Image (tube, rainbow, N blue to C red):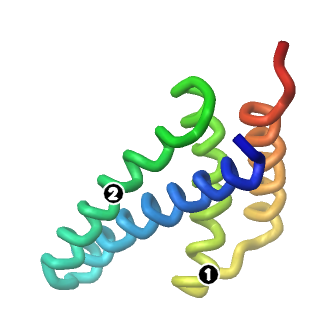
Amino acid sequence: MSLLKSISYFVLAGLFEIGGGYLIWLWLREGKNIWYAIAGAIVLIFYGIIPTLQPGNFERVYAAYGGVFVIMSILWGWKIDGNTPDRFDIIGSLVVLVGVAIIMYWPRN
């Protein structure tokens, strides 16, 4: 599988997980209509499917995805909620990104 395709699956999974969770968050924390929760639950089902398209073992894919989730959550908060990341968010994201690259894409024998 190409690197670009793999990264695309990670980004898509992140959008579905964070988007679905965000819809449920809006329902529970901000009193939005129950349809937000239902839509969020449906989106989260798709999130559960997308990572299975990645090559590799379950533990490696989900460990690497955890790092992608960290980065995308910070970006989501910045672009959707308007919470500007501070330097520690950025430094932490860069550290996590290095970890993702090592776990998922480092050549193995």
The spot of residue 21 in percent (x, y) is 37, 63
The spot of residue 24 in percent (x, y) is 28, 68
In the rendered image, the vertical position of residue 40 relative to residue 67, given as above or below: below
Label 1 vs 2, first from the N-terminus: 2
Numbered label tally: 2
Please state, as top left, top right, bottom left or bottom right, where the C terminus lies in the image.
Answer: top right
Q: Which residue is mark 1?
A: 83
Going by the image, does 4 lie left or right of 15? right
Picture quadrant of residue 105: top right
The spot of residue 97 in percent (x, y) is 78, 49
Please state, as top left, top right, bottom left or bottom right, where the N terminus lies in the image.
Answer: top right
Going by the image, does 44 lie left or right of 83? left
Going by the image, does 58 lie left or right of 105? left
Mark 1 packing: few (<14 Cα in 10 Å), some, or many (20+)?
few
- Helix, strand, or loop for circle 1? loop
- Helix, strand, or loop for circle 2? helix
For this rendering, which residue is in front, 28 or 80? 80
Could you tell me which residue is drawn at 74 percent across and 63 percent down?
Answer: 89
Mark 1 vs mark 2, CA separation in Å: 24 Å
Mark 2 packing: few (<14 Cα in 10 Å), some, or many (20+)?
many
Could you tell me which residue is drawn at 28 percent across and 67 percent down?
Answer: 40
Q: Amino acid at mark 1?
A: Asn
Could you tell me which residue is drawn at 54 percent across and 61 percent down?
Answer: 12
Q: Which residue is mark 2?
A: 44
In the rendered image, the vertical position of residue 87 relative to residue 62, given as above or below: below
Going by the image, does 37 lie left or right of 67? left
The spot of residue 76 in percent (x, y) is 57, 73
Q: Which is in the foreground here, disc 1 or disc 2?
A: 2
